[in-house]
């Protein structure tokens, strides 16, 4: 999976609540410890405008499929730590806070 698709999937899942909390077997069960996360994002086709031959600029087309990203809690924490370190080192974090 290209990095751009990975980041887009993660962003969309977090923005729209597409996160499942999974146990060590990859299942979501009440009362079991979380060991993995599943980030889910929809893939939509281009909508057709009602009175035009071209694709609309706004709205969503038909759901074509779902993209899933499953990651262990430990690997996700490691990713977040590395990402924050990169934001600090590149001074993006300071610019965003200003």
Image (tube, helix red, strand yellow):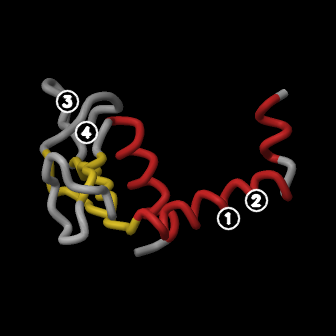
Q: Nearer the viewer, residue 31 or 97?
A: 31
- Sequence-wise first label, 1 or 3: 3
Secondary structure at badge 3 equals loop
Eyeballing the image, is 60 above or below 75?
A: above
Residue at left 23%, top 35%?
60
Q: Position of residue 40 (x, y in %)?
A: 27, 53
Q: Nearer the viewer, residue 9 or 70?
A: 70
The residue under label 4 is: 54
Q: How many marks?
A: 4
Q: Position of residue 14 (x, y in %)?
A: 40, 42
Q: CA distance from mark 2 to mark 3?
A: 45 Å
- Sequence-wise first label, 2 or 3: 3
Q: Position of residue 17 (x, y in %)?
A: 31, 37
Secondary structure at badge 1 equals helix
Q: Residues within 10 Å of mark 2 (few under 14, many from 20)?
A: few
The residue under label 1 is: 82
Q: Which mark is residue 49?
A: 3
| In this picture, residue 97 sits left or right of residue 81 | right
Q: Residues within 10 Å of mark 3 (few under 14, many from 20)?
A: some
Secondary structure at badge 4 equals loop
Q: Are marks 2 and 4 in contact (CB under 8 Å)?
A: no
| In this picture, residue 73 sits left or right of residue 21 | right
Q: Nearer the viewer, residue 48 or 13?
A: 13
- Sequence-wise first label, 2 or 4: 4
Q: Are marks 4 and 3 in contact (CB under 8 Å)?
A: yes
Please identify, in this view, whether the residue under mark 4 or under mark 1 is nearer the observer: 1
Q: CA distance from mark 1 to mark 2?
A: 5 Å
- Sequence-wise first label, 4 or 3: 3
């Amino acid at each position: 999976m290209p990095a751009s698709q990975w980041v887009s999937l993660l962003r969309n899942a977090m923005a729209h609540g597409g996160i499942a909390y999974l146990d060590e077997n990859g299942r979501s069960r009440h009362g079991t410890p979380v060991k993995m996360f599943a980030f889910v994002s929809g893939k939509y086709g281009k909508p057709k405008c009602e009175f035009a031959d071209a694709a609309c600029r706004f709205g969503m087309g038909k759901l074509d499929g779902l993209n899933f990203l499953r990651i262990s809690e430990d690997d996700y924490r490691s990713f977040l730590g590395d990402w924050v370190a990169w934001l600090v080192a590149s001074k993006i974090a300071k610019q965003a806070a200003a």
